Image (cartoon, rainbow, N blue to C red):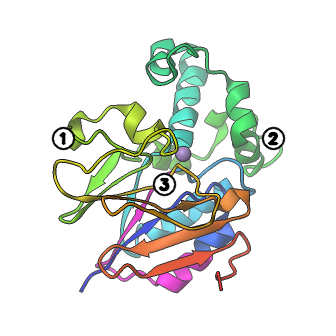
Amino acid sequence: MAKTWAIGDVHGFSLALCRILDRIEPQKDDTVVMLGDYIDRGPDSRGVIDRLLRLRSECRLVTLRGNHEAMLLELLEREQNGQTNDSFWKRIFGKKSSFLRSDWLDLGGRQTLASYGPLTTRISQLPEPHLRFLAETVLYHESPNANFTHAAYIPELEMSEQPIQALLYHRLRVSIPGPHFSGKTFYVGHSAQRSGNILDKGHIICIDTCLYGGGWLTAREIDSGEMIQLDAAGRLRS
Ligand SMILES: [Mn+2]
């Protein structure tokens, strides 16, 4: 039977991503759902995107948009149009409507630009296939038994009605949503579990196990529950 793997936040750690895919060995009919936040913080965002572009031809690949991809895309638009889309940030952060390029750089954007070489100072300098990859990321994925988002969801809303704030930004330490009306289990990332263990509430399972903070990259197969965890150097959790 075809497998469906969910993989948590990679944040620029390409070696861990490559090693976990080596272990999963996804087949043509298998689905890999990447939960977002491919870039920023870690050393090799460029390598992460390169690997995901290759993965497209190896299996069914779903790449969700994380808040870090959303930030990059928003700043790219500003570079290209010279405009500040204040309403976008106001919707998400409320009072803090003036999200700045410097905020993104401090959140790991600096490392992302550096991974493209010392002459890369603007997002628009990224290779066109990489910018297209980032723009093509999706806000959620639905399968027969499970749904997937980067951060969370609103229990009573259809997926197409979910607000960006819930899908990309909500922190589970603030509140854990109740079961979705569909009855499906949700797989999410974003809320880094500093314990290194996944957060499994039954109806919502967070597999961001804080790779960038010395934790693990987690992959979980949604039917069997099989789980693989590797550190930034690609070493299996014992
Ligand atoms: Mn995130």
The mark nearer the N terminus, 1 or 3, is: 1
Name which residue type carries label 3. Gly
Residue occupying image coordinates x 30% and y 54%: 141
Front residue of 58 and 23:
23
119 relative position to 193: left or right: right
- Residue 109 falls within the magenta-colored stretch: no
Q: Secondary structure at mark 3?
A: loop
Magenta region, residue range: 19-36
The mark nearer the N terminus, 3 or 2, is: 2
The location of residue 161, given as percent across then percent down, is: 22, 34
The location of residue 202, given as percent across then percent down, is: 33, 63
The reply to whether discs 1 and 3 touch (Cβ–Cβ < 8 Å) is no
Front residue of 231 and 126:
231
> Ligand 1 is located in which of the four quadrants?
top right
- Residue 26 falls within the magenta-colored stretch: yes
The reply to whether discs 2 and 1 touch (Cβ–Cβ < 8 Å) is no
Q: Which residue in the protein does label 1 denote?
A: 158
Q: Which residue in the protein does label 2 denote?
A: 119
Front residue of 214 and 233:
214
